[in-house]
Image: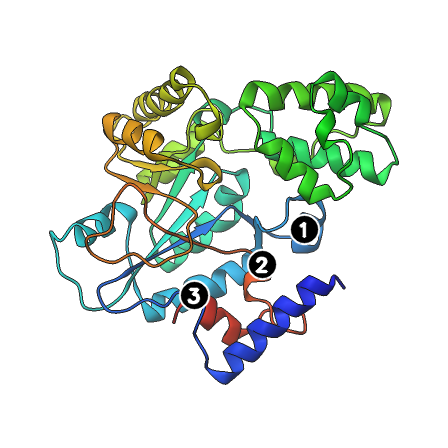
Amino acid sequence: MNTNLLIKRSIKSLTSAAGIKAGFPQPVPGSVNILAYHRVVADITKAEKEAIYGIVVSSATFRRHCELLRKSFDVVSLETARYFLDGERKVVRPLAVITFDDGYLDFYEEAFPILNELGLPATVFLPTDFIGQTKPLAHDRIYWLVKQAFENSVSISAALHRAGMTKFAGEKDVLKLTDLIVFLPDELREKVIFEMEKELGSRFQKYPSEYQLLDWEMVREMSRKGISFGVHTANHVVLPLENDSRMETEIVESKRELERRLGEKVDSFAYPNGEYNPKVRNLIAEAGYKIAVTTEKRINRPGADLLTLGRISLCEESTRGFKGVYSPKVAALRLGV
């Protein structure tokens, strides 16, 4: 087992067993705990082999999370939470909001039935240009290509050189190299992806079907049944890395597209990879968004900046204990109950 992973599990297990909550954000009456997920999967073993670390949770664990949240919080939509955070409404009991980034197909297949059964709302943030398309998001393609290259002893140094990224060639860790490439301007990272696919040639295995995103009919169906949708740019770009024109296009055009597809106003936004700066925040405000979420690990209190709200990111590993299986005590700690 990875030493760092063992240490983290030990800390979570010991902390939760001792009832110590220091270092973990804890909700208080009147606060809003916004939780962030990506994928909910039936086969967690397979998914953890194919997906970037930290974005998958099993259906069984997600159900446990939802049941725990329902007992300990008033679970509300992000739009409803906005009224409490800006002081328009008062609340005594802590609130929880369930959010999903990226709009993977397994949200429709696995998460939506659980939410629907338990009567819980959620908000899904969509990269609009990828919805209904077969091409996976850039971070999934990058991870899959790097993973294949390393596992098949294929050097991608030449591919990185052709893309002008020779400085990355010495990195030997799959996740670290994936992260380096993900955090490039979109045009450049697409060039890296193209060159890596070319370098793998006949050894390239097609992207897993599990990388597939929702289509628009699914989105409309779930919208009619209590699921809210927000914007995650058009192409899941890291906004601070793009020029002003591209930033504005990604923020404004994606909002227009989602509103056109849903036939209703869209007010919420999630920063891809959690990245933003004052300029990006101002563009979000100018585009007419009323609420936006980051990946900053904190609980939100009334008076918080509605365009830079914190979230607690969760995956299967988040609520595993020392033995590597779901731990109710660790879950209570991580979910703030």
Badge 1 element: helix
| Crowd class of label 1 (few under 14; some 14 to 19; many from 20; radius 10 Å) | some
Kind of residue sitting beneath label 2: Glu
Please tell me which of labels 1 and 2 falls first in the chain: 1
Q: Position of residue 254 (x, y in %)?
A: 37, 23
| Crowd class of label 3 (few under 14; some 14 to 19; many from 20; radius 10 Å) | many
Kind of residue sitting beneath label 3: Leu
Q: Which residue is the site of mark 2? A: 316
Decide: is 306 above or below 241: below
Say whether residue 58 is visible. yes
| Crowd class of label 2 (few under 14; some 14 to 19; many from 20; radius 10 Å) | many
Badge 2 element: loop
Please tell me which of labels 2 and 3 falls first in the chain: 2
Q: Is residue 28 left or right of residue 2?
A: left
Q: Are marks 1 and 2 in contact (CB under 8 Å)?
A: yes
The numbered disc on residue 335 is 3
Kind of residue sitting beneath label 1: Glu
In the current view of this chain or complex, which residue is farthest to the right? 153
The number of discs equals 3
Q: Which residue is the site of mark 1? A: 48
**Label 3 vs label 1: CA separation?**
21 Å
